[in-house]
Amino acid sequence: MSRKLKSIAGLLAAAGVTLGAATLSMPTAQADGAGASGFNDCPTSEVCAWQHPDYRGYMGHAEGNSKNWSNKIENKDSSWYNNGTGTGNTSVRIFTKHDYKGDWFCLDKGEYDNYDNDLSSNDRGSSHKWVDPSDC
């Protein structure tokens, strides 16, 4: 899997699209990830981010969109899993800035990833938004 960060501003400008204010924002639900030992710890229908590679350490997770990640995981994320279900907006964009701004990478439903020494995404997550798979 190739997971390069993309400049959302450049992509949207090229497509002639502008962003409106987000209408749905859900706080990130938190779990004490001290015992998290793998991506299977991620609750169904949620996106999860771990503090360390290989799905270890603190795990932040949310079912809905999050414009502003908790300080416990923001810019401390090193592995991710999209445990989303259903149809429609089943892919998730992880953004480097609050309010769905900055560079981003996408995880399709069921996809998990480690930063694997790719420092372009390590410790940079600040928000996420569920999107249609065609938007990845």
Image: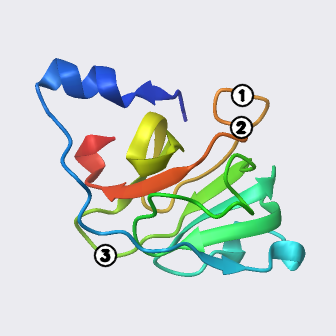
Label 2, on which residue? 122
Callout 3, which amino acid?
Gly
The circle on residue 41 is: none
Number of other residues with Cα within 10 Å of mark 1, as a class: few under 14, some 14 to 19, many 20 or more: few
In the image, residue 93 above or below residue 57:
above
Q: Which residue does the image show at 40% across and 65% down from the upper left?
A: 65
Tell me which residue sits at (46%, 75%) in the image.
63
Which residue was labeled with disc 3?
86
Label 3: element kind: loop
Distance from label 2 to label 1 (Cα)? 7 Å
Residue named by callout 1:
118
Check contact, mark 2 vs mark 1: CB within 8 A: yes
Cα separation between marks 3 and 2: 28 Å
Alpha-carbon span between mark 1 and mark 3:
30 Å
**In the figure, is residue 33 to the left or right of 110?**
right
Residue type at the position of mark 1: Asp
Residue 29 location in percent, x, y? 58, 79
Q: Check the picture and name the quadrant holding the C terminus.
A: top left
Q: Nearer the viewer, mark 3 or mark 2?
A: 2
Name the secondary structure under disc 2. loop
Q: Residue 38's x, y, as percent? A: 77, 68
Residue type (three-letter) at the residue carrying disc 2: Asn
Q: Nearer the viewer, mark 1 or mark 3?
A: 1
Taking 106 as reference, is 69 above or below it?
below
Q: Earlier in the sequence, mark 3 or mark 2?
A: 3
State the SS at label 1.
loop
Residue displayed at 80% across by 67% down: 58
Q: Kindly indicate whether the residue at mark 3 contacts the one at mark 1 (C-beta within 8 angstroms).
A: no
User: Which of the two labelled residues, at mark 1 and mark 3, occupies the earlier sequence position?
Assistant: 3
Q: How many marks?
A: 3
Q: Is residue 75 above or below residue 45?
A: above
Name the spot of residue 21 as percent of width and height, x first: 23, 53
